[in-house]
Image: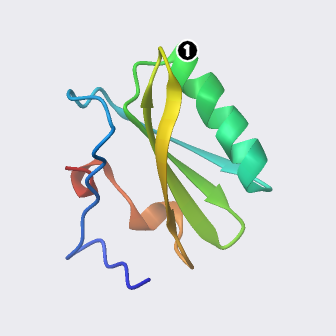
Amino acid sequence: LDWSGSEDSILFLRAPTQFNGFGSLSASEYASAFALAKTMFASNPFSVIAAQVGADVYVFAGDSHSGPSAAVELVGRSLNDIVPGHII
């Protein structure tokens, strides 16, 4: 995957229609990242949560009602490589 935050963006087709915020977290494995994202979605008005898992970043889209509904893996990237402006 060739991700460049200065040139690329992510469009989640199943994401909420209104962008309500961006959160981030770190986890040791994908399952933990998913569980933490689900908890964060339930208690915050976030639309997107980026999770650092080892050397990769998973970007989850979702809402407080259903939790994470879609995810994208950015291989070999860090949380510094993704900001709210990358989500369209």
Question: Vertical placement of 53 versus 14: above or below?
Answer: below
Residue at 29% over, 59% down: 10
Comparing 42 with 14, the one in front is 14
At horizontal 24% and vertical 72% (from top left) the residue drawn is 8
Q: Position of residue 79 (x, y in %)?
A: 50, 60
Question: How has the structure been colored for display?
Answer: rainbow
Q: Secondary structure at mark 1?
A: helix
Above or below, 67 against 86 in this view is above
Residue at position x 50%, y 21% from top?
66
Please state if 72 lies on the left or on the right of 19 as rendered: right
- Residue 5 in the image: state x and y as whole percent: 30, 71
Disc 1 packing (10 Å; few <14; some 14–19; many ≥20): few
Q: Amino acid at mark 1?
A: Ser
Residue at 72% x, 54% y is 30
Residue nearer the viewer, 1 or 77: 1
Q: How many marks?
A: 1
Residue 70 pos. (x, y %): 46, 44
Look at mark 1 in the image and give the residue it sits on: 43
The quadrant of the picture occupied by the N terminus is: bottom left
Please determine whether, in this image, residue 40 is positioned above or below residue 13: above
User: How far across and how far down the image is residue 84, in percent?
Assistant: 29, 48
Q: Is residue 79 left or right of residue 88?
A: right
Closer to the camera in the image, 49 or 69: 69
Location of residue 21 by image quarter: top left
